[in-house]
Image (cartoon, rainbow, N blue to C red):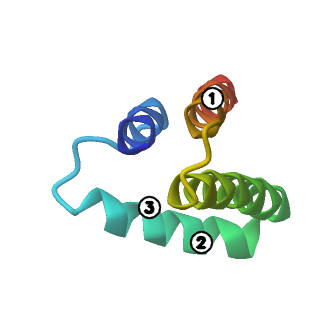
Amino acid sequence: MLVIRAEVMNKEGLGGFEDHPDNIMAAAINKYSREDQEFQRTFIKAFSAIEEVMNQMMNQDPYTEKAIEEFDEKMLKD
């Protein structure tokens, strides 16, 4: 998932900064969540999907790998 996040950050022009990427992401999420309701809905949906995959991983669900692949495909497509 970290690779996907790095790819998405680079795709959106958020790579190569001196500040830590997590700080940049936190500031952007905070700002856009307050200002853009569509962003907020999309972020909540993505966070829910990540949470679901994490729960599957913690429960050692045999379908976790497939869920991660589907999540990867969806996030890179959007």
Report whether 27 appears left or right of 36. left
Choose top left, top right, bottom left or bottom right for residue 54.
Answer: bottom right
Residue count near mark 2 (Cα–Cα under 10 Å), binned few <14, some 14–19, many ≥20? few
Identify which residue, 24 or 5, lies in the foreground. Answer: 5
Q: Quadrant of the C terminus?
A: top right
Name the residue beneath numbered marker 3: 25
Amino acid type of the residue tagged 3 in the rendering = Met
Report whether 34 appears left or right of 29. right
Disc number for residue 23? none
Choose top left, top right, bottom left or bottom right for residue 72.
Answer: top right
Name the residue beneath numbered marker 2: 31
- How far separated are the C-alphas under marks 1 and 3? 27 Å
Report whether 12 appears left or right of 10. right
Report whether 14 appears left or right of 17. right
Name the residue beneath numbered marker 1: 66
Q: Quadrant of the N terminus?
A: top left
Query: Closer to the N terminus: mark 2 or mark 1?
Result: 2
Residue 15 position, x and y percent, is 30, 41
Identify which residue, 44 or 49, lies in the foreground. Answer: 49
| Residue that lies at the very extreme toward the left in this rendered image | 18
Query: Closer to the N terminus: mark 1 or mark 3?
Result: 3
Residue at the (58%, 59%) spot, across then down:
59
Query: Closer to the N terminus: mark 2 or mark 3?
Result: 3
